[in-house]
Image (cartoon, rainbow, N blue to C red):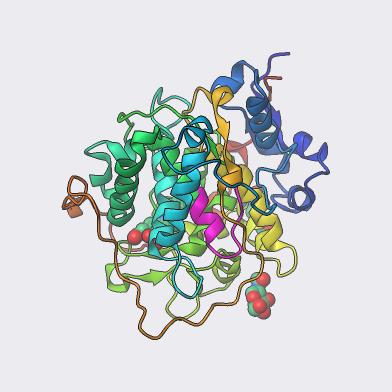
Amino acid sequence: MKYNLIFLTAAASAVSAFPGMKDLMADLGKRQAETATVELLGDLLDGATTPVGQEVKDCLLGNVACQDPSKKTYAPPGPLGSPACAEDTCCVWDFIQKDLTDLFLDCDGTCNELARGAVRFGFHDAAAWSKTSGFGGADGSLLISKDEILRSENQGMDDIYAAGNDLLAKYSEYGIGAGDLVQFMHNTATVLCPLGPRILTYVGREDSENNPTGLLPDTHSPAPVLIELFQDKTINFKDLIALIGAHTVANQQFVDPSQAGAPLDSTPGIWDVKFYNETLQATPPPGVFRLPSDESFKNDNATAPGFTVFSDPVTGQTTWNAAYSVAYVRMSLLGVNNINELTDCTKVLPDQVFDFTPKACPSSSSSSSYTSTTSTTSIQILHDHTTMAPMVTPAPETDSYDSYGTTTAYVTVTVEC
Ligand code: HEM
Ligand SMILES: *[C@@H]1O[C@H](CO)[C@@H](O)[C@H](O)[C@H]1NC(C)=O
Ligand SMILES: *[C@@H]1O[C@H](CO)[C@@H](O)[C@H](O)[C@H]1NC(C)=O
């Protein structure tokens, strides 16, 4: 059979191996559950021809979990550079994972600004792609092209850009690619941030410096515009509102420079569901900043239910981690056309942290900004501040979305199976 899309609801109801997802499908977007579609990606549109292709397909369609919370048992078969290590595609990534653990955690066990940067960086590299862009996506361009990091939408990621390039310089002789590294940094950051998911992690992407412009979201756009922007990347509104929860580990610098450094929830070092809870409140807690786009999502009929589902004090974290993993595996494969040839290296990721209490730090320790180790990448990054968006505008009224239901009534659906 040849189809291009399937009903999300149809895919979900066939699933029981995936406890959180069932409730999610029942509750999230009740009104519009029938309108969310799940599409396949890249070469999977021509069929899953390998076990890894089938695994990715099953994960994207909701038939198996897109995360692996099991405890790590992997040990590298030999030292870095040894023949045994070179023979195991995942081996070098285990060494990279160790470096990232040193970079991403603060002494109290929370994740730091480099981890937050890595989460955003993975998104910004991958999302410079659409179904019609023809190129771009999770190709490492944000790390290796000269100009992409200079764009206004990529402001504030200089440290993770430098750290990523240092790792690329250190490990490229062992055959790693930039696109893989960028997504590996994202997935290592999410599992290191306490409570975050251990997302299925693939390597083997093709790198490219080319990347389309104008495909990243503007925080001043209303929810329906943003929903459509992501739908054009195959990311439906349910995926989108799960992904937005990444703002649980986020600070803002440039939306309101007078509040530079303000977090988007009260615990920016923990992958918890407070972002959803606190965004639901009429006003954010003191010191917490709310992006206009997040306010708009909260007030949009398609995305509002996600805030309630994911902020649930009992089931929210589990449900959200599962949903985020589904949506992020998709994100991490945008523009990737050799999915059948990838290798699953999830096994090298650190253990997930299911319960978290901050540890006491040695009194002398302090966090400092990243210092690049390679001269080639420690370049001065100058951004064009003139293109910065104007200050926060009030979020539009809910009523202004009254015509929205019709614009997302995606009903027709076909899938490649
Ligand atoms: C409609 C979609 C989105 C919009 C409009 C948006 C907008 C923004 C803005 C304006 C900031 C603050 C930037 C600054 O002033 O420094 C931010 C930060 C951040 N965003 Fe998003 N975002 C979106 C989706 C996402 C997604 C899908 C992810 C990840 C999967 C993500 C991850 C982050 C992270 C981790 C930060 C914090 C970065 C840091 O603290 O260094 N965002 N986002
Ligand atoms: C948010 O969390 C607080 C504190 O746990 C709780 O009292 C409140 O009901 C929650 N709000 C929502 C909308 O879940
Ligand atoms: C959104 O929900 C509100 C409240 O339930 C309703 O009044 C409004 O008509 C809905 N809008 C759309 C576009 O369905």
Q: State which image quarter holds ligand 1.
A: bottom left
Q: Nearer the viewer, residue 250 or 27?
A: 250
Would you place residue 62 above or below residue 374 in this image? Answer: above
Would you place residue 331 above or below residue 393 in this image? Answer: above
Can residue 26 be seen here?
yes
Q: Position of residue 144 (x, y in %)?
A: 29, 37
Residue at left 34%, top 53%?
160
Q: Nearer the viewer, residue 387 or 123?
A: 123
Please provide the residue range marked out in magenta. 187-199
- Number of numbered discs visible in the structure rendering: 0
Q: Is residue 192 magenta?
A: yes
Q: Quadrant of the C terminus?
A: top right
Can residue 394 be seen here?
no
Residue at left 73%, top 13%?
1
Pick out the residue farthest to the bottom. 363
Q: Nearer the viewer, residue 130 or 15?
A: 15
Image position of 278 (left or right of 306): left
Residue at left 72%, top 38%?
62
Q: Is residue 198 magenta?
A: yes
Would you place residue 364 above or below residue 179 in this image? Answer: below
Q: Position of residue 200 (x, y in %)?
A: 60, 42
Q: Position of residue 138 (x, y in %)?
A: 43, 35
Q: Quadrant of residue 220?
A: bottom left
Pick out the residue farthest to the top. 1
Q: Position of residue 378 (x, y in %)?
A: 20, 51
Image position of 177 (left or right of 387): right
